[in-house]
Amino acid sequence: MSIKVYLMRISFGICLGLLSCGQPAEPPETAPIITPSTEKPELSDEEKEFARLSVLAVKGDAKSQTSLAHKYALGKGVKKNMKEAVRWYRVAGNQGEVEAQFNLGYMYYNGEGLPRDFAKAAEWFRKSAAQGNAGAQGSLGLMYDNGEGVPEDNTEALRLYHLGARNGDMYSQFNLGCIYDSGEMVPEDNAAAVKWWLKAAAQGHIDVPNYLGLMYDAGEGVPEDDVRAYAWWLIGIGRGDDAPRANMALLEEKLSAEELATAKKLADDLQKEMEAKKQPEKKK
């Protein structure tokens, strides 16, 4: 709420005129007198929450410190400040708070709020992964996969991807699908690729519907099914991926109007089914 400023205009000319018993008098030029309001601006809900977390964070509560860092990182209830976000993630992470450790690793990996440092990123991801954080497990797996901050190690990468995927990390699920589809690190297994891609799709992964459409279109890992392929491509388009458009155009020439209508209904049904299975986002 903005501060209201009330302006009080006092005309001394009228008073002077009355005192002079009708003698004409020119009112002097006067500047308006501003009376400051004593009202304090009302805080928004975000600002109130930021203030509450600040008190708890200073007292040493690690969860509150992590949540306060989120606020600084996102600019919620306070001006965005990545350095302050890093500071509070570090304070909480040093107390063993798993989410803070993961986010600190992420910031080191991307160079947000501090210089990019893969070795430091791996260090913090490892601490978080050891406590079961799925995102940290998958991120550390990616670092072993690429040899970033750690020696390249496909065995360790695969182990961590599986850990992250089983714990619900959709990026690990997507990466495992790609690994099984390509036959890198493991024997090629299209059925396993589809299994992991379906799990990633259920969590809202943007790119994976295109891959699933290709699998159904070619009959790899699943029975060939052009209607289901078109349905998955529709889902991908709905998520903002333009990659399926060319293949959809080819199928539109092949499928009947009835089959296209069936594909659209199937896409709606699959989307509803995935929404029902989607894991709720953690509150920050």
Image (cartoon, rainbow, N blue to C red):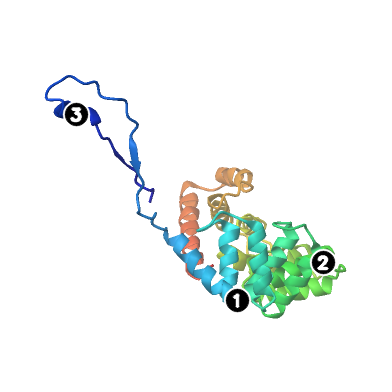
Picture coordinates of residue 52, whole percent (x, y):
48, 69
Residue at x-position 78% and y-position 58%: 116
Left or right side of 67 for 110 = right
The mark nearer the N terminus, 3 or 2, is 3
C-alpha separation, residue under disc 3 versus residue under disc 2: 79 Å
The mark nearer the N terminus, 1 or 3, is 3
Mark 1 lies on residue: 62
Residue at x-position 15% and y-position 25%: 20
Considering depth in this image, is 207 or 254 the residue closer to the camera?
207
Picture coordinates of residue 282, whole percent (x, y):
54, 70
Residue at x-position 53% and y-position 51%: 238
- The amino acid beneath tag 1 is Ala
Q: Evaluate if marks 1 and 3 touch, with contact meaning CB atoms under 8 Å apart.
A: no
Mark 3 lies on residue: 14
Mark 2 lies on residue: 119
- The amino acid beneath tag 2 is Ala
